[in-house]
Amino acid sequence: MTSGTALMTDQYELTMLGAALADGTAGRRCTFEVFARSLPHGRRYGVVAGVGRLLEALARFSFGEPELDALRATGAISERTLEHLASTQFAGDIAGYPEGELYFPGSPVLSISGTFAECVLLETLVLSILNHDCAIASAAARMTTAANGRRLIEMGSRRTHEEAAVAAARAAYLAGFDASSNLEAAARYGIPTTGTSAHAFTLLHDTEEEAFRAQVDALGVGTTLLVDTYDITGGIETAVRVAGPELGAVRIDSGDLGVMAQRARAQLDSLGATSTRVVLSGDLDEHAIAGLRAEPVDAYGVGTSVVTGSGAPTAGMVYKLVEVEGRPVAKRSSSKESRGGAKSAVRRHRPTGTATEEVVHRRDRSVEVGEHDRVVPVALVKSGEPVSGLPGLGEAREHLRANLVAIPWEGLKLSRGEPALPTTFLD
């Protein structure tokens, strides 16, 4: 097993490279673009996430002896191709939508320019990262909107692949979640973490009171006690008796959560624990969170739905060749059509700051950029080197918040409808 990313790819990328090396076309200058033909069913916008992870992965994309030996063992890669790979390193340019940006059908989310030989190898790496992270961030942003300022905790690590869990925690945080249960996400990306106990800790003890007392002794009265192992009403009474009215929070993980939240709030207030927060978890998604908006809830813990994209686990992005030696090329299949030429995009805005339109145009065509408009793609990589000063995770989080404020309010609805912004294509 290697620590690089070069083998996180599909075999056909290397066999295409081999054929292009053989016929002399491998050195042709090309541009590939990443875009989504449509948004997942019912979605009105997508969120760009994973660009930072992609740049990190690109830095580790090289073919050393372990990778070459593994490829040689397959018998599918020619020696000539292996010799080429031994010295390959991406030296092209990448421009694209920064993290925290919104995208719509046809938005040129990423443009990769260089020789065919270096660009064709990146398809799987690019798509595997962006399709996953954009899907998670898009779902998480809808949950953030539905929560309407209430605290959100990502706690889905046990519902997905161990590496996907870390990436999902990052994408959810970018989209507005406040914390994650995943400690590796904290180590890699500095994401705040939280967590106290599961039902197993209560069941370990002879009584619920003993379990609560042990937790409070270890973590202090500001901890969150899980009160639904046996009886919620009894659990809350015990929790306040053990921790006192300064108890940090109670968590309810089952039952009719709206009704339970009302009862918990009333009971806590009657016991003098007026500052104790009510935290809900258990199969929540954006629709359930929106349905709980009127209830006395202080925070939500979201697991399965966020790490699986809430029903849309992939963003549906594709990686298509759009230009060869400055000549536009395009796929003409009626069901999978693409538009030729390297592209950019301008986001139109009213003077009030409300976005009105996404204008996608060929990069070799000038487009008027109004006083309140902005060019969306930015340079990410030049001559193989990441551009300095790119926004970090915290800045991307704020960028997304500003973007969501800018789109028309109808675009934030959870119901089905047209994309929040129309896309206009200028040929």
Image (cartoon, rainbow, N blue to C red):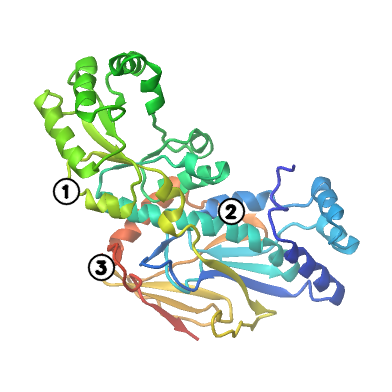
Residue 410 is marked as 3
Task: Give whichever of discs 3 and 2 has the lower sequence position.
Answer: 2
Q: Are marks 1 and 3 in contact (CB under 8 Å)?
A: no
**Which of the 4 image quadrants contains residue 207?**
top left
Residue 399 shows up from this direction: no
Residue 54 is marked as 2
Q: Residue furthest right?
A: 79
Q: Secondary structure at mark 3?
A: helix
Q: Secondary structure at mark 2?
A: helix
Instruction: Please give left or right for residue 246 compared with residue 220 in the image.
Output: left
| Residue behind mark 1 | 294
Q: Position of residue 228 (x, y in %)?
A: 28, 30
- Residue sitting at x 35%, y 14%: 206
Callout 2 amino acid: Leu
For discs 2 and 1, the disc positioned in front in the rendered view: 1
**Which of the 4 image quadrants contains residue 277?**
top left
Instruction: Please give left or right for residue 39 compared with residue 207 in the image.
Output: right
**Which of the 4 image quadrants contains residue 126?**
bottom right
- Residue sitting at x 24%, y 42%: 257
Dot 2: within a 10 Å radius of its alpha carbon, few (fewer than 14), some, or many (20 or more) residues?
Answer: some
Task: Give whichever of discs 2 and 1 has the lower sequence position.
Answer: 2
Q: Position of residue 423 (x, y in %)?
A: 40, 77
Q: Position of residue 237 (x, y in %)?
A: 18, 22
365 and 51: which is toward the camera = 51
Q: Secondary structure at mark 1?
A: loop
For discs 3 and 2, the disc positioned in front in the rendered view: 3
- Residue sitting at x 68%, y 53%: 8
Q: Could you tell me which quadrant the N terminus lies in?
A: top right
The CA distance from mark 2 to mark 1 is: 40 Å
